[in-house]
Image: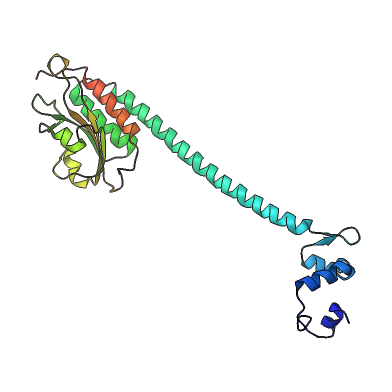
């Protein structure tokens, strides 16, 4: 009595210690019961081709297709994320360039401060922006005054920018000061003193969101705006 006859009679083919090596050897010697059983092959996802050959192509192809679909889906998601980031970067750069052109139309220090605050709100969605200049010396109308040494204390002597939570007592944003939760400070040194001497200054941006500005963020666009403000300010030297 063979393996299949045992099964047909209700006997357990594994009860006598039958294991895969025996089943494999039997199938190798008697392929007909498997290759001729079309219903079983279809249930297993296989198909018979030539005599004594079982084609595993259907099942294998299904697995390959599934893997390819997963790869395509991952690549599509990655491409979409890259495209989204690229569009956001392009939009931010465009807004920055438009803001720079607006700042370049300023007619004086006070107009420059007003335009900076306006473009920061309109173009970048922040709560406000300000220009702060260290004393001693004349502080242009619309600019904020800082005590001597304030820029180095806030930025460290070699620091160029600072992004993070609001600093209490800084008072740079006027009427919206109480709503500010995070800030970006960019160091400037406009040559607006007597005989073109440089003075320590800051270009400041404020957000009402706690994560509006964080240390992990890049600030290239904000720094670019600060450089435009710095160069524009030098058009009108102050008296002291």
Give percent across and percent down for residue 5.
87, 81
Left/right placement of residue 162 relative to residue 64 reads: left
Task: Name the residue at 77% across, 63% down.
Answer: 45
Quarter location, residue 196: top left
Given residues 206 and 111, the one toward you in this image is 206
Q: In this view, does 25 lie above or below 6?
A: above
- Please state the horizontal and vertical placement of residue 188, each as a whole percent of the image: 22, 27
Q: Compared to 110, does 91 lie above or below? A: below
Question: Residue sitting at 33 percent across and 23 percent down?
Answer: 101
Q: In which quarter of the image is the C terminus?
A: top left
**In front here: 168 or 99?**
168
Left or right of 59 in this view: 198 = left
* Residue drawn at 8 percent across, 26 percent down: 136
Residue 40 percent coordinates (x, y): 81, 69
As rendered, which of 142 and 25 lies closer to the eye? 25
On-image quarter of the N terminus: bottom right
């Amino acid at each position: 009595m063979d393996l299949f006859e045992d099964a047909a009679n209700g006997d357990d083919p594994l009860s006598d210690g039958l294991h895969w090596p025996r089943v494999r050897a039997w199938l190798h010697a008697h392929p007909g019961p498997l290759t001729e059983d079309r219903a079983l092959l279809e249930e297993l996802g296989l198909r018979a081709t030539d005599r004594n050959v079982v084609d595993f192509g259907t099942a294998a192809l299904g697995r390959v297709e599934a893997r390819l679909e997963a790869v395509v889906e991952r690549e599509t998601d990655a491409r979409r994320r890259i495209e989204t980031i690229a569009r956001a970067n392009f939009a931010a750069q465009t807004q920055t360039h438009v803001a720079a052109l607006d700042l370049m139309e300023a007619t004086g220090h006070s107009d420059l401060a007003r335009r900076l605050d306006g473009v920061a709100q309109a173009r970048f969605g922040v709560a406000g922006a300000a220009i702060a200049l260290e004393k001693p010396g004349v502080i242009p109308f619309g600019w904020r005054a800082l005590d001597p040494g304030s820029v180095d204390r806030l930025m460290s002597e070699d620091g160029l920018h600072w992004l993070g939570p609001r600093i209490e007592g800084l008072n740079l944003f006027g009427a919206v000061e109480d709503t500010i939760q995070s800030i970006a400070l960019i160091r400037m040194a406009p040559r607006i003193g007597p005989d073109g001497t440089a003075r320590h200054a800051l270009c400041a941006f404020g957000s009402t969101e706690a994560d509006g500005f964080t240390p992990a963020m890049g600030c290239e666009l904000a720094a670019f705006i600060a450089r435009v403000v710095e160069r524009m300010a030098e058009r009108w030297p102050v008296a002291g």
